[in-house]
Image (cartoon, rainbow, N blue to C red):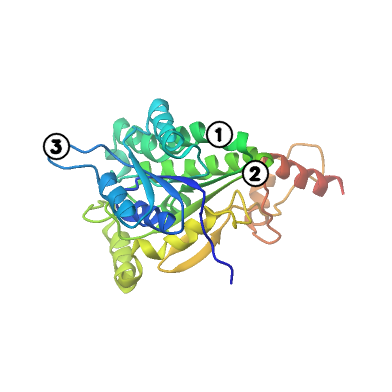
Amino acid sequence: MSTVDFKGRRAIVTGGGRGLGRSYALELARRGAAVVVSDRPGTAAEPSAADAVVQEIVDAGGQAVASYGDLTTPEGGAEIVQAALDAFGGIDVVVNNAGFLRPGEFHDLSGDDFDAMLGVHLLGAVNVCRAAIVHMREQGYGRIVNTASNAGTFGMPAMANYCAAKAGVLGLTRALSIEGEPFGIKANAILPNASTTISQGTPIPGDQAAQGGSRAYKEQLADRFSPEMVTPLTLFLASEDCPVTGEFYSALAGRFARVFIGVADGWGGETEEAPSIEDVADHFDAIRDLDGYVLPTSVVDEYRIVAEKLTA
């Protein structure tokens, strides 16, 4: 069995001061990476959590620096990447992990509730990647792991703002994978479940039956929700050994699995005439049938699939 290491690699972990991010940063450093631990700035009364992780890495003989750049702005994203350039001379790995929760039923969520969530989860990834990918393209190598969520993929009550932001991360990851592939850049997404700072003590309103069911299942799996249960898959996707790009992976209670978006075989296209609404109604079961689904690798690929089917 080969050993996965990050010797000589320079990595950024956003939200690296606690929870999943801390686990990622420590393991990256343990396996040889020089790490920028990105997190919010501290105060005189409470130092940044990033500083404690950096100290932990340095005390263990590793290399790390902290960055407090505001990743919700382009300037802050560039500042985080510049920290890697200044300290380590380059950037090879970006793990976009920063996030928080602001739950509420959809009709109660304000515009600011959506702006804040999109700003950190989606634009935070955009801003760091946009600054980093320039250097990755120049060197012909890069690994990007974005943090999505099963909530953004499958839905969750009282979390519409979070779900929307995380669904956007999936689209961003696909786009980065397509544009980055000619330059040796691979981008994938992790859908992690763990007991972390943002998930603990955050009451989620709404359908109590649905939330109660979720809590009951999580209690059954309580011993399997540590950040360390997610870290192996995340870091494999961040490694040189990773063989895939543009893919999504669930990490839940020690079970790792691919999550995918496919298109069913569908119905229609036998003639060039537009079908009627009644035609759609009559064939709706066929439209919904999942048999023969495919996984397009891009919009162009879906065009190809349909063109080949209808002109065969």
Tell me if mark 1 has few (under 14), some (14-19) or many (20+) residues whose alpha carbon lies within 10 angstroms of its own: some
Relative to 11, say whether 194 is above or below. Answer: below
**Where's residue 182, x and y in %?**
69, 40
Which sits in the foreground, 236 or 207? 236
Cα–Cα span, label 1 and label 2: 12 Å
138 or 191: which is nearer to us?
Answer: 138
x and y, in percent, of residue 299 in the image: 67, 40
CB within 8 Å, label 1 to label 2 = no
Asked if the residues shown at circle 2 and circle 3 are in contact, with their CB atoms under 8 angstroms apart, the answer is no
* Amino acid type, residue under disc 2 in the picture: Gly
Give the labeled residue for mark 1: 135
Q: Quadrant of residue 298?
A: top right
Amino acid residing under circle 1: His
Residue, disc 2: 184
Residue 105, image x, y percentages: 29, 45
Left or right, 62 with respect to 47, comes to right
In depth, the one of 245 and 276 nearer the eye is: 245
SS assignment at label 3 = loop
N-term-proximal mark, 1 vs 2: 1
Residue count near mark 2 (Cα–Cα under 10 Å), binned few <14, some 14–19, many ≥20: some
Q: Residues within 10 Å of mark 3 (few under 14, many from 20)?
A: few
- State the count of labels: 3
Q: Amino acid at mark 3?
A: Ala
Name the residue that disc number 3 marks.
Answer: 44
Secondary structure under the numbered disc 2 in the rendered image: loop
